[in-house]
Amino acid sequence: MPASFDALVIGTGQAGPALAARLAGAGFSVAVIERDKFGGTCVNDGCTPTKAMVASAYAAHMARRAADYGVRLEGEPRVDLGAVMARKDAIVAASSRGVQRWMEGLKGAKVFRGHARFTGPDRVRVNGEELSAGKIFVNTGGRPLVPCMPGLSGVPYLTNQSMMALKALPAHLLVAGGSYIGLEFGQMLRRFGARVTVIEMGPRLVAREDEDVSLALKEMLEAEGIEVRLNAKCLTVKKEAGGLSLGLDCAEGAPRARGTHLLLAVGRVPNTDDLGLEAAGIRTDARGHIEVDEALQTSNPRVWALGDCNGKGAFTHTAYNDYEIVADNLLNGAGRKWTDRVPVYALYTDPPLGRVGMNETEAKKAGIKALVGKRPMTRVSRAVEKGETLGFLKICVEASSRRILGASLLGTGADEAVHSLIDAVYAKTPYTEFQRHVRIHPNVSELLPTVMEDLQPVQ
């Protein structure tokens, strides 16, 4: 007979632990299953370690700029990569241990270590032991995509996971992929002292953003000495003396880019291919994401999928919101849906990009007559005072209703300032109402109402 529980939680990323705790607190008997490190991608390979390293890269950058602020340092600042990684590792270890202690000490819950595979619609096997439950929650996350690239099998390469164990600074890092992961690591390694080339198959960086955002990011990176290659079709890899090269087939520039290390930053895939989902009658889409309805329930009514494995957000904050939706629906009959949430995220380059709701391109594609306001950071006093004036503030509103549709904020503090607009987008607040609220000076957020003083039609 299998060990029986009220609920099984598979995976301890951002959704799993909080859900286990909430259910246990409501009197459910809960089994928590983890095959590797507690905390999932965010804690171990994603947000926590990368933002710790971004902080070190920012410190190095500001040390080089010290004279701009009237501060004199003797000699060129030197980055100790070992110390950078040790700081990062300490932060990660504390976070991961914290999640593990939480789960292991949770009253009403039992932790199982090992890989879970479904053996039926209401049961899984872990290390030879079978567990059953009336409710099962899958929070297995994702992993870096390794593409089918000719020659790749013959050279060593890095992913966002293996970058976390880097022992020495690459002399010249080639970054395959010009989106969020690639740009954050590219700028970070450049500030640590590496030569960096970012290679993107598309016509511009971060293609989901407006063109002016993509162009500003490209210019920002190039100003720091990062080479950017666009329209790189038919990528091929070749081993060479002292490193490797990528064949680019670009319309402009040299036909091959040569470097010592290669970082693959071309996307992620869900950890669903070895869960035995067929045995439970759980359907997946063409990319391997578990198909869910608006309440995150799968084709098996006993099973819910949360976080990266369901393809409905792929962010830490959306995974946590998945937990909130599922728990609220189960315990309170709230009727919440993941489709009700507004897209919000940030790109943690320096300066960062903060995004909420629709941008100009998305509004146009949706057939919405929109107005856009824009203000350069050179006209934001807080940015001038900090000596960090790259970027701009851009807000999109609907012409007919005057409601705020979304924003693209690229500049110092933009990852925080964007939160001033999140509630406004959710509430469909007219920009004229938003402009009436007093904000603190000096601050980036105080200029958001000003951005909407000169709105222009989207062409």
Image: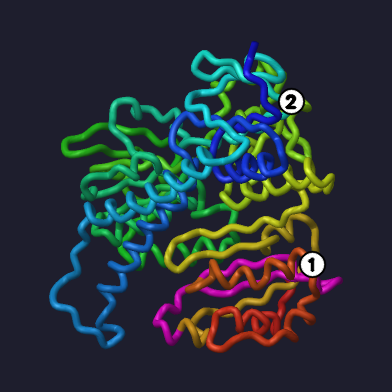
Report the side of 59 relative to 2 (left or right).
Answer: left
Which residue is rendered at x = 29% and y = 62% of the image? 191
Question: Which residue is the site of mark 1?
Answer: 427
Q: Tell me the quadrant of the picture where the N terminus can be found.
A: top right
Inspect the magenta stretch and tell me whether residue 189 lies in it.
Answer: no
- Magenta-highlighted residues: 384-410
Mark 2 or mark 1: which comes first in sequence? 2
Q: Which residue is mark 2?
A: 134
Hey, what amino acid is under mark 2?
Gly
As rendered, which of 93 and 424 lies closer to the eye?
93
Q: Quadrant of the C terminus?
A: bottom right
Image height of 362 relative to 104, above or below: below
Q: Quadrant of residue 302?
A: top right
Picture quadrant where residue 330 is located? top right
167 left or right of 373? left
Which amino acid type is marked by label 1?
A: Ala
